[in-house]
Image (cartoon, helix red, strand yellow):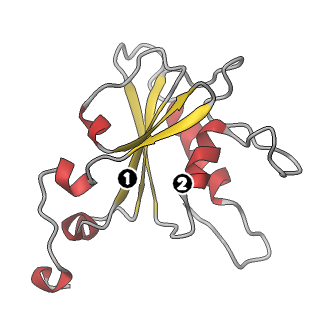
Amino acid sequence: MNYEAWSGNATAAALALVASLRKKGGRYGDKLGLPFVVALNSFDVMCTEHDFDRVLFGDRPDSAMIRPQSGFWGTPATPLFRRVSAVLFTKNLWPETILLGQVQACLYFNPWAHLPYQGVLSALDSVEYVDGVLKRKAGAPLHELLGVSARPAHELGF
């Protein structure tokens, strides 16, 4: 993912994330028969939970945006990518950052999924869309879910 904050052609992080999701969300056809979770990692330190919210659910109707962006999952009236059960967004995911316990991870559940996800990743921080409101739930950090004890950098030789 590329986010050029200071170039003449600066792009919003949300646009790059949506493009990646559309590419990944259309893979494997409709015949999986199992919940389908798409995982995306961003190395962009400027990317926030607002960007992730906007990517999946679009701009709110009261947004001050000139051209509101529609979300990856569409709306209750026109849902899109219903075969994608959830999206796992991570920031700063490298083997080293897992060992240091510095990975941010959040699982977003698709409210209109054909096959809802209820697996082990549900133990992470998560977001659900309930009655038009995004509900956040605190969960375990990724390194704990993986059974890795976070250690200080100097113990790991960094």
Label 2 sits on a secondary structure element that is: helix
- Any mark on residue 49, and which? 2
Residue 42's spot in the image, x, y percent? 47, 59
- Any mark on residue 105, and which? 1
Label 1, residues with CA under 10 Å away: few <14, some 14-19, many ≥20: many
Image quadrant in which you'd find residue 118: top left
Residue 139's spot in the image, x, y percent? 30, 46
Is residue 111 shown above or below 18? above
Is residue 77 shown above or below 23? above
Name which residue type carries label 2: Glu
Which quadrant of the figure contains the C terminus? bottom left
How many dots with numbers? Answer: 2
Q: CA distance from mark 2 to mark 1?
A: 10 Å
Q: Residue at x 33, y 62 (%)?
A: 103
Residue 100's spot in the image, x, y percent? 22, 71
Q: Residue at x 31, y 44 (%)?
A: 124
Q: Residue at x 69, y 60 (%)?
A: 12
